[in-house]
Amino acid sequence: MDTLGSIQTVIALIVIAVTTITSWMLGVRMRRRIKKTLGIQVTNEMELTSLKNWMNVENTEEKNRGGKLY
């Protein structure tokens, strides 16, 4: 049973590492998108998750596309 516990521990560590790296990459992409679209530097998580900021990003990107969705 000791090897089963070791395997579960390794799998848990791999899942935690992948989740951490993925969430960090997503945060970087979101910051870049806000900076590129709105020209503002996101300084904290509150600004990054603000609905107002994302509505402004969508409106600005829509204007840049000429009113087309995609």
Image (cartoon, helix red, strand yellow):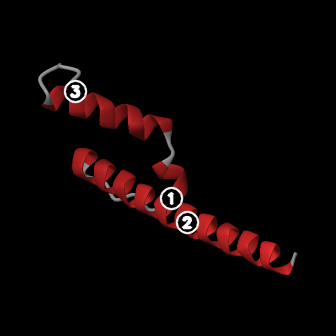
Q: Which residue is mark 1?
A: 23
> Looking at the image, which residue is at 79% across and 72% down?
4
Residue 10, percent across and down? 67, 75
**Real-space Cα separation, disc 3 to disc 2, in angstroms:** 32 Å
> Looking at the image, which residue is at 22% across and 33% down?
61
Q: Which residue is mark 2?
A: 20
**Real-space Cα separation, disc 1 to disc 2, in angstroms:** 5 Å
23 horizontally vs 61: left or right:
right
Marks 1 and 3, the one that precedes in the sequence: 1
> Looking at the image, which residue is at 40% across and 37% down?
54
Q: Depth-wise, is mark 3 or mark 2 nearer the camera?
A: 2
In the depicted structure, whether residue 9 falls above or below residue 65: below
Q: Amino acid at mark 3?
A: Glu
52 horizontally vs 6: left or right:
left
Q: Amino acid at mark 1?
A: Ser
Q: Nearer the viewer, residue 6 or 64?
A: 6
Where on the picture, by quarter, is residue 12?
bottom right
Q: Residues within 10 Å of mark 3 (few under 14, many from 20)?
A: some
Q: Amino acid at mark 2?
A: Thr
Secondary structure at badge 2 equals helix
In the depicted structure, whether residue 5 falls above or below residue 38: below
Marks 3 and 2, the one that precedes in the sequence: 2
Q: Which residue is mark 3?
A: 62
Q: Say which quadrant the C terminus sits in.
A: top left
**Real-space Cα separation, disc 1 to disc 3, in angstroms:** 26 Å
Residue 41, percent across and down? 34, 59
Q: Say which quadrant the N terminus sits in.
A: bottom right
> Looking at the image, which residue is at 44% across and 57% down?
27
26 horizontally vs 32: left or right:
right
In the depicted structure, whether residue 32 falls above or below residue 54: below
**Dot 1 and dot 2 residues touching (CB under 8 Å):** yes
Secondary structure at badge 1 equals helix
